[in-house]
Amino acid sequence: MSIVVMGTVALDTLKTPHGEKKDLLGGSAAHFAMSARHFAPVNLAAVVGEDFPKKHITLLKNKKINTNSLTIEKGCTFRWKGEYKDGDLNNACTLHTELGVIITCIPRVNPKQKNIKNVFLANYDPDIQYEFLQQMHKPTFVGMDTMNLWIHTKKQSVVRLMKKVDILILNDTEARDLTSEKNLIKAAKAILSHGPKMVIIKKGEHGGIFYSKNHLFALPAYPLEEVIDPTGAGDTFAGGVMGYLTKAKKINSKTLIKALSYATILSSFNVEGFGMEKTAGLSLGKVEERMKVFREFFRF
């Protein structure tokens, strides 16, 4: 089985206490795909501008990520410049955003990919996420991500889309904003009342919570001595979850715990370098090595 992911492919300029990097390959769909590729074939749907470096497309293709639904439009690629200040690597300060072609161009799925059953709607305008989902032919497992901007400005659209998805992945602040519940278990229950069968609430360095009608469990983050750049960690996490569940072809307590564990490991590699410095060259063997250590945390 394979996955279609729709989201942004961007050029990121990042500044952290560890340095500054310019025009790195980024975006919600790109980080997702670079993670999910370890478990299942990934088809990436996004729009970029004429200025998008060919080397980035070459990298995606070299990682066996299908780019047939990545379209190049007249104009500039979506660019984001952000900074992590004062040692706070949990919150990025946006210095500049250039939306470019994503203002006027909507991602379109290649006709040959419309029958793919597993779909992930990475962070994007919820109305465009909804429209993209309508392009797919009877998907059987749909996931989505969102952000505070859309919760605050297009909450009705976010809720409308939630009725169409099986799993929602978001962070703790977003979960609280979406539901007006301070307690995350109550927030998770409220989210399920809007349609999703499952929800994962990410808590950054404190791990995450999985909640469904039949399951509730929490996992810690993988402990690291140093974090370089957390940009894309959430998208990397989502790619790990969807990728593993696609490979497993079934959802039960065992596969869910494994999916979240692999997602945790993949995102731990992501934060150890700028952009995709660590994830682009990452092998599944290296992931398994760290996974073995992670499993030891749960032996009593």
Image (cartoon, grey):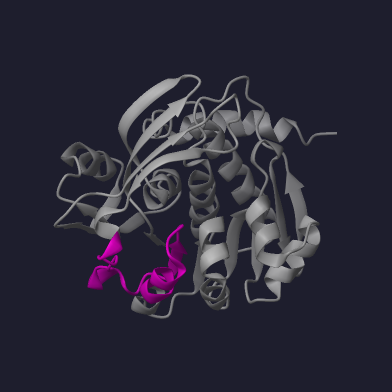
| Residue 147 at least partly seen | no
Q: Residue furthest front?
A: 95
| Residue 190 at least partly seen | yes
Give above or below for 169 relative to 162: above
Give above or below for 161 relative to 80: below
Residue at the spot 66% in from the left edge and 52% down from the top edge? 173
Q: Quadrant of residue 199?
A: bottom right
Q: Position of residue 281 (x, y in %)?
A: 37, 30
Give above or below for 112 relative to 201: below
Q: Is residue 295 left or right of residue 1?
A: right
Residue at the spot 48% in from the left edge and 31% down from the top edge? 285
| Quarter the C terminus occupies | top right
Q: Position of residue 215 (x, y in %)?
A: 76, 62
| Quarter the N terminus occupies | bottom left
Instruction: Judge whether residue 109 is colored magenta.
Output: yes
Instruction: Judge whether residue 154 is colored magenta.
Output: no
Q: Start and end of the magenta stretch?
A: 103-132
Q: Out of 135 and 103, give the one closest to the viewer.
A: 103
Q: Position of residue 268 (x, y in %)?
A: 56, 33
Q: Position of residue 146 (x, y in %)?
A: 52, 59
Q: Quadrant of residue 175?
A: bottom right
